[in-house]
Amino acid sequence: MTAIQTVRLDRSWWGRHGGTATVWSLRALLVVALLVVWELTAERWFDITFTSKPSDIWTRLVQWHQDGTLWSNTWITVQEVVYGFLLGAAAGALTGFVLASARAFYQVLDPFIMALYAIPKVALAPLFIVWFGIGMSMKVLLAAATVFFLVFLNVAAGVREVDRGLIDAVRLMGGGRRDILVKVVVPSSMTGLLTGLKVAIPYALIGAVIGELVASNRGLGYLINDAAAQFDTAGVFATLVVLSVIAALLNLVVGLLDRRASRWKPLGEER
Amino acid sequence: MSDTVTSETVIEVSGLGKQFVKDAVGIVALRDFDLTIAQGSFVTVLGRSGCGKSTMLNLLAGLTTPTSGTVSYRGRPVAGPRTEVGYLTQSDTLMPWRSVHKNVELPLEIAGVPAQRRTEHAAELIGKVGLEGFERHYPRELSGGMRRRVSLARMLAGDPETLLMDEPFGALDAQLRGELQAELLRLWADGGQTVVFVTHDIEEALLLGDRVVVLGPVGRIVLDRPIDLPRPRDADELRIDPEFVALHRELTAALREGAR
Ligand SMILES: Nc1ncnc2c1ncn2[C@@H]1O[C@H](COP(=O)(O)OP(=O)(O)O)[C@@H](O)[C@H]1O
Ligand SMILES: [Mg+2]
């Protein structure tokens, strides 16, 4: 019968990583070019009060770094994102599992869940302020609210779309309800869970920052509000830089989750 | 059925009917079906697609419940799937998130076999179906034929005494089908299992079976006869054997008659 056939590939470093290296250098070049153009044209073409310029933003970052403003506020926001994400994800996964397993019950609740899901989560901010004050818990819950729905819906879909044939296969092996749950339902909804986690990560950041923008006295959202109120555009941009760095790091985590999730997937589903 | 000395009945089906509900109409898939399977026999069930073969096997396996009639296994009514019966379904049901090895191990895992023994047994079965070196591959990384072989190994891992097989080699190339048919016959000769093998291929039915049952629409039995061709049967030699040719003609006629 067919034996496994492997072929040794002699590929140099450049052969393997050349493409990636080129893309990254072009990206870096683009950023540098943009910064240079911005810096040079800032004072001539634009009003610096509105657009600031890279060197000012850098100065602000260094200054905030020295007086600790940057780290204390970043730390607050990061905490809100992480707690909000964990809380929302845990609650969403658990609820998704339980509700989707109770098919009839889920059918009854479905329209209500979708209605709640459709509410813009910012609209909940005032209510959360009344309930929890303007401290960290309000932002955590705002982040968690969005994450919850994304994880919940994906897990529930995963559980409901379990292949009937796989359940039958376990039944044929003499498996009971517990085996079906452990060997089929949980692993097959794992893709749904990972997809949910993946799409929810950026929303945790959005939720936390919006919460801070609405009402707070700490965090990166507060820093933006505060800087903008004083017409300190360099401060606003400096905070945006920090936020994009956080977003990029979160995307890195997403990428890792993605790779983990797609190992066994049918080839057609890969992109 | 009076073929061998040990013709103890394993499966007995009487008055079996299955109806599916679709919107306002009932789809009759099987009607008034009777069948008796003797222990150790290799029965091939031949029929065109849509005549209720898979429906019948699902009922024999206890995966679905009949609308009417009864299925009994060794004299006891079948209420659900049982581990003595292995069922190779028409579609693949390998767990896509488990490697080949882990898939083959699954029945043993469910039976509570200790890890060490599980690994050894699975490795042995994977070797038997010719998939050494693919233990760590995932189903999606395998060809259709290889997936079939994994399914076969997985079914054998449960050590069933009765095998139900639903067009198991239907989608494979002739070469591979021949290899797997030979492998199945070897397994059957060694293990003495009872086999119910569903196919739509006349040649396959004749090559494998002790007895062939030809089904018409809704599982009406058009023909039920023993096949006395001497074993081991070789596909190439059989094709020019006059007895085989006569049988082939008879089954073709039966299939055509059944379609009417
Ligand atoms: N789950 C189902 N729902 C509705 N109709 C079905 C279902 N399963 C099978 N049928 C119908 O029953 C008939 C027999 O199907 P099947 O047993 O799969 O045939 P075969 O395996 O011989 O090709 C077909 O007409 C098919 O459409
Ligand atoms: Mg079928």
Image: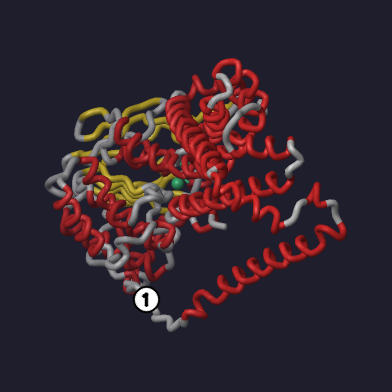
Residue B215 can be seen in this image: yes
A132 or A62, nearer to the observer = A62
Which quadrant holds the C terminus of chain B?
A: top right
Residue placed at 39% from the left, 62% from the top?
B145
Q: Residue furthest right?
A: A45
Amino acid type indicated by mark 1: Gln
Q: Position of residue B5 (x, y in %)?
A: 12, 47
Vertical order, B154 against A135 (above or below): below
Side (left or right) of A67 relative to B124: right
Residue placed at 37% from the left, 38% from the top?
A168
Q: Position of residue A113 (x, y in %)?
A: 58, 24
Side (left or right) of B255 relative to B15: right
- Asked which quadrant contains residue B184, the reply is bottom left
- Asked which quadrant contains residue A97, the reply is top left
In this figure, which residue is indicated by the disc labeled 1?
A: A5
Residue placed at 20% from the left, 50% from the top?
B193
Label 1 near ligand 2 (CB < 8 Å): no
- Asked which quadrant contains residue B242, the reply is bottom left
Q: Position of residue A266 (x, y in %)?
A: 48, 55
Vertical order, B69 against B223 (above or below): above
B148 or A35, nearer to the observer = A35
Which quadrant holds the N terminus of chain B?
A: top left
Mark 1: few/some/many CA within 10 Å (<14, 14-19, 20+): few
Q: How is the image coloured?
A: secondary structure
